[in-house]
Image (cartoon, coloured by chain):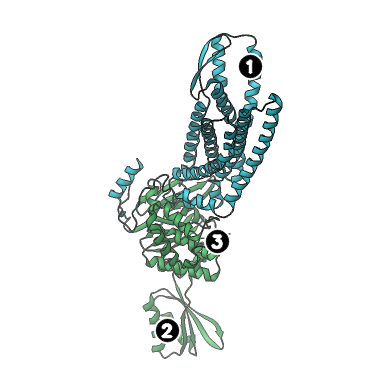
Amino acid sequence: MIESRNMSSEEYVIETFGLVKRYGKVLAVDDLSLQVPRGAVYGFVGPNGAGKTTTMRILTTLISPTAGESYVTGYSVTESPREVRRAIGYMPDFFGVYDDMKVWEYLDFFAACYEIPERERPALVDDLLALVDLTHRRDDMVEKLSRGMKQRLSLARTLAHDPKVLILDEPASGLDPRARIEIRELLVEMAHMGKTIFFSSHILADVAEICTHLGIIETGKMVAQGTVEEIRRQLIPTREITITLLDRVDEAKEALAHIEGVTTVENMPDEHGRKRIQVSFSGDDEGVSGLLQALSSRGIPVVNFTEETDDLETVFMRATKGIVS
Amino acid sequence: MEEQATQTTIETAPEHKPDRKFRYMPPQLVTDNPVILKELRGRMRGARAFNVLTIYLFLLGTFTSLIYVAASESAVSIGGQANVGEIGRTLFGGVVAIEMVLVSFIAPAFTSGAISGEREHQTYDLLRTTLLPSHSLVLGKLLSSMLYVVLLLTAAIPLQSIAFFFGGVAETELILSFVILLATALLFSTIGIYFSTRARRTLSASVLTYSVATFITFGLPIIIGSVMIALGLWYNGGQSSGAQKVLLYVIGGVLCTNPAATALLTQYVLLNQRTIGAFSYTLTNGQQVTLISPWIPFTIIYLALTAVFFVLSIRRMGKLEE
C-alpha cells in the first residue's frame, strides 16, 4: 500500500520530481526538481515570492502539490505523511508561539505531540534548552522572550523528536546581526550532529558561509542547483584576476596573453600610481598559480596578485537577473 | 488500518530504524493527551480561571437570592401558610435555569477559539506537522473545555442544594439536571469546535456558535410555542385518535431538542407520573399511549449530534489546504 522508494533515496534525503503547485492562475512552483543529499546543508535561495515557502509546505505535508512527486527520507510526502512528519523538523517563517506557556512547557508540549513518553520528556527538554542556550529562561513565559530567543526556541522545538532532516523557512529573517550569527552557529552545530538541513533565505550572505549545497529558485523554477563550487563554476565561467605591477606592463600583458585559458587581458585604471591589469582566466587553482609563475620567472615586478572572487551574492544576482523586477 | 500501514513501512522502508533514541508509543487518547495538559495548564494559570469562577458563582448566588425572595413571598401570599416544598422546587429550577444559560454561553466561548485560535497564533501548522492526530487535538480541546464546565457545575452544587432545606426536590432531580446540563454543554462545545475548524477567525466562529446556541435555547421554544398554538387551534376541530397520537409524538420529539423544555417536562413527569422512565398517558378520548421521560430522548439526540459534529470537525481538519 505504501510505496517507499529505494532508488537513490540512500543518497538523497529530500527529492522532488517535477513538482507543480498552482493557485488559481498563479503558478507558485513550476516543475521543480530538487535533490538534497544526506548530511548536506542546503541553502534554498530565491527572491521573495519565488516559491520557497510553497515548496517547503509541500515537503512538510501541509499542502498537496498540483502535480509531481516528492520524497523525504524515501517516503512519499503524499502517500505516507506520517513517516515524513516523523523524519522532519519544520520551522516556518513565523514564530508559532502560545502566549500562556512557559518555555519548558512549550518544548514539553511539542515533545508530547511527537509521542515522546512522559518520563523521557524532562531530560529531553533540559537537553534542548541547553543546546540553544535558553536554560536560564526555562521558567519564563514564551511571549516574554526576544525575537532571537523565540527563534532559538523554535529551533529547539524542531529537534524534539530527533528528526533526520530540518526544514527551516527563513531561519534568520528579521533577526538582529547577533541573533543571526547565533542561529548560524546553531545550524552548523546541527549539521555536525548529523542532521541534513534544508533552509531557505532570500539573503545570500546568510547562506553563503555555512551551506554545502545551493538551490536557486526563481518564479517557481530551479535556476541552478548543486554544490556551492559547482554553482559558482556554472554561473561564473571565468575567474577575474587583478595584477598590480611596478612596471613593464606591456611585457606582462604579452606574457599572459599566450597562456592557455586566458581570454582577455585588459588595462585597468591606475591605483595610487601603480599600474594594474585584469586577466580573465578559465582554469583551476594550479592554472592561477601558473600565471603568477609566468610573470615572476620573467622577472616582472608583481606587487599584488588577487583573484576577484565573485561572491555568491554576485552569483545570485547573475542567476536571477532580469527575471525579477 | 493506520497501525498496520506503519508496520509495513517500518519493515520495507529503506532507512527507518524503530530503535532510535526514543521509543514511540501511541498516546492514550485521554490519559496522555498533550492538548488536555497544555490547555489545562494555560487555563488554570494565573487569576483568570479563579475570576471566571468567582463571577459565575457571584451571579448565580445573586440570582438564587432573588429567586428565594420572590418564591417565598409568593408562596406565603397564596396559601396563607407557606408551601415550603414549592419554594424548594422554584429555587432549584431557577438555579438550574441560570446554570443552563451560563453554561450555554461559557462552553462555546472555550471552544469556538480552539482551532481558529491555533491558526491565529500560527501554531496550527506546527501541530499539523507533528504526529498529533486530528482526533486527539479535537478531543483534547473538547475535554479540557468540558472539564472546566464540570468544575463550574460542581461549584454550583452548594447553591442548588439550598433547595434541599425546603424539600420538594430529590437527588434524582439533581442528577438529571446534571445530565441535561452536561449534554447541553457537550453539544455546544462540539459545535464551537466545529465552527472553529471552519472559520478562519475566532470571531466568526464565536458568532456562528452563539447563533446556533441562541437558536437552540431561545429561538426553538418560540417556534415550538407558535406551532403549538397554531396546532391547538386546528386541534379544536377534532381529530382521530391516530392523529392525536402522532401529534403528541411530534411535539414531544421537538420539545426534546430544547434543554429548558426538556428539564421542565422531565420534572413535570417526575412529579406527576413519579417516574424518570416510561409511563402511559391518557389522551382526551381515553386512549392510552406510552411515553418516556424527555431527558432520555434529549440525551440521546444531544450525544448523537455531538458525535456528528465531532466527526465533521475531524474530517474538516484532515483536509489538506488547497
Measuring from the top left, give residue B62's x and y in whole percent. Answer: 66, 41
Callout 3 amino acid: Gly
Residue that mark 1 sits on? B231
Q: Which mark is residue A276?
A: none
Mark 1 crowdedness (10 Å alpha carbons): few <14, some 14-19, many ≥20: few
> Judging from the image, what is the letter of the chain drawn in cyan?
B
Quadrant of the image containing the N terminus of chain B: top left
Residue A61, given in percent of the width and then of the height, sits at 44, 49
Q: Mark 2 against mark 1, which lies toward the viewer?
A: 1
Chain letter of the residue carrying label 1: B
Name the residue beneath numbered marker 3: A322
User: Pointer 2: what residue?
Assistant: A255
Query: Could you tell me which chain the residue with mark 3 belongs to?
Result: A
The amino acid type found where label 2 is placed reads Ala
Q: Provide the chain ID for the residue under circle 2.
A: A
Q: Element under label 1?
A: helix
Label 1–label 3 contact, CB within 8 A: no
Instruction: Answer above or below: position of A88 versus B245.
Output: below
Which badge, 3 or 2, comes first in the chain's sequence? 2
Q: Is residue A102 visible?
A: yes
Q: Residue furthest left?
A: B11
Q: Nearer the viewer, mark 1 or mark 3?
A: 1
Which of the 4 image quarters holds residue B245? top right
Secondary structure state at the residue bearing disc 2: helix
Asked whether the residues under marks 1 and 3 belong to the same chain, the reply is no
Q: Residues within 10 Å of mark 3 (few under 14, many from 20)?
A: few
